[in-house]
Amino acid sequence: MSYALSQLSEQVTTARANMHAVRIVGGNTKAFYGNPIEGEQPVTELEMAGLSGVVSYEPSELVITALAGTRLADIEAVLAKEGQMLAFDPPSFGATSTIGGVVASGLSGPLSFGYGAARHFVLGAHLLDAQGRILKFGGEVMKNVAGYDVSRLLAGSLGMFGVIVQVSLKVMPVAKCDMTLHFEMSEAQALDFCAGLRAKAMPIRAAAWQTEPDGPAGELAVRLCGADSAVQHAAQALGGQTMAADLAHDWWRGLRDQQSLAFAARPLWRLAVAAQTPQLGLPSCAFDMGGEVRWLVAPHADAPEVREMARQAGGHATLFRAAPDDAWPADGVFEPLAAPNRAIVQRLKREFDPMAIFNPGRLVAGI
């Protein structure tokens, strides 16, 4: 066990002995995401930045293993040298974003429309538990599936089961040709355009729309990635204007990392809805995943109203960024779990963290 890992283990066991909650801190770029930590007990902050570095990387195996405090930007730089990437396109929300935070949050970017969500790329993970032990799940090669489900369980868990200290991720080659098509259209028109995209035999990897306050009707972007011939053929069939590479890079980054003006207002809700859902009762400031993710700024709507809208559309709603002066929803920012699912999560929490010291309540209110 490395010195940095030994220190983290000692901090955890000391916090457990003193009945402190443990708040896990990576780059602190996603501190806004999730519920406030619950309870009146003192809080020990566990800083992960010292646990950094690429453990192994085999480009031919399409697998990278890194310590949790390694910055996302450093991982991406290492992969780029070999013409590879994290295909689930993780948002960073800042330069200090870490790979442990990427996995713990489970968030994916626009390219996940075509490549898949973050959890599908997690091959293995090492977890520091409340007793200071390192639990190892999954493998470091794609052929090894032992413990695979537990590794995926940690993706999006927001640290509720323990401290992710190491992860192994599947990576993918960068596409030979990457083209973004641009269309000016309203939300309703964009949703209608995107309704059948998944069914098309085209290399469509992302499709998203966003608008700006008091701006034009909106902009739809469709990203094509693949062999040059396939991309060119799809571009001719879809139409639109080809966006310059640097402008396309900025457009997708502005959407992914919420840097564009569309995301400036609060409170910001994220709604996951069924495919081909038409425009909702509240207008979106943006949508992603071909319309399956809607971003709403709803200052005058309460949580039950927004959640009911999402349920009617076959999905669920998350208060992604709260307004500074607003009260938190009593049942949390995420969709409340049905009783059977909540019971399963409670049992898992007791198994991994029986004294409930890790990020209490951050993912599921009351757990």
Image (cartoon, rainbow, N blue to C red):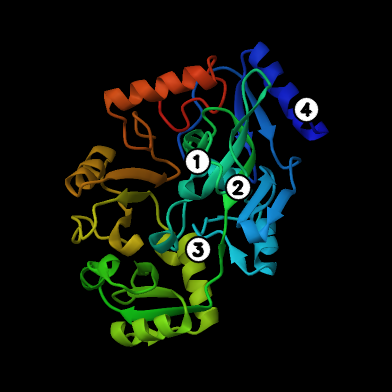
Residue type (three-letter) at the residue carrying disc 4? Ser
Q: Are marks 3 and 4 in contact (CB under 8 Å)?
A: no
At x 69%, y 44%, the residue is 69
Work out whether 40 lies above or below 302. Answer: above
Residue annotated with mark 4: 6
Work out whether 40 lies above or below 104. Answer: above
Q: Earlier in the sequence, mark 4 or mark 2?
A: 4
Q: Is residue 225 left or right of residue 185?
A: right
Q: Earlier in the sequence, mark 2 or mark 3?
A: 2
Residue type (three-letter) at the residue carrying disc 1? Ala
Q: Earlier in the sequence, mark 3 or mark 4?
A: 4
At x 27%, y 28%, the residue is 338
Residue type (three-letter) at the residue carrying disc 2? Val
- Outermost front residue: 143
Graded by Cα atoms within 10 Å as few (under 14), some (14 to 19) or many (20 or more), the crowding at tag 3 reads some
Q: Which mark is residue 141?
A: 2
SS type, badge 2: loop
x and y percent of residue 137 in the render? 58, 33
Residue annotated with mark 1: 155
The answer for how far apart the CA atoms under marks 1 and 3 are is: 24 Å
Q: Is residue 359 left or right of residue 288?
A: right
Quarter of the view holding residue 263: bottom left
The quarter of the image holding the C terminus is top left
SS type, badge 1: loop
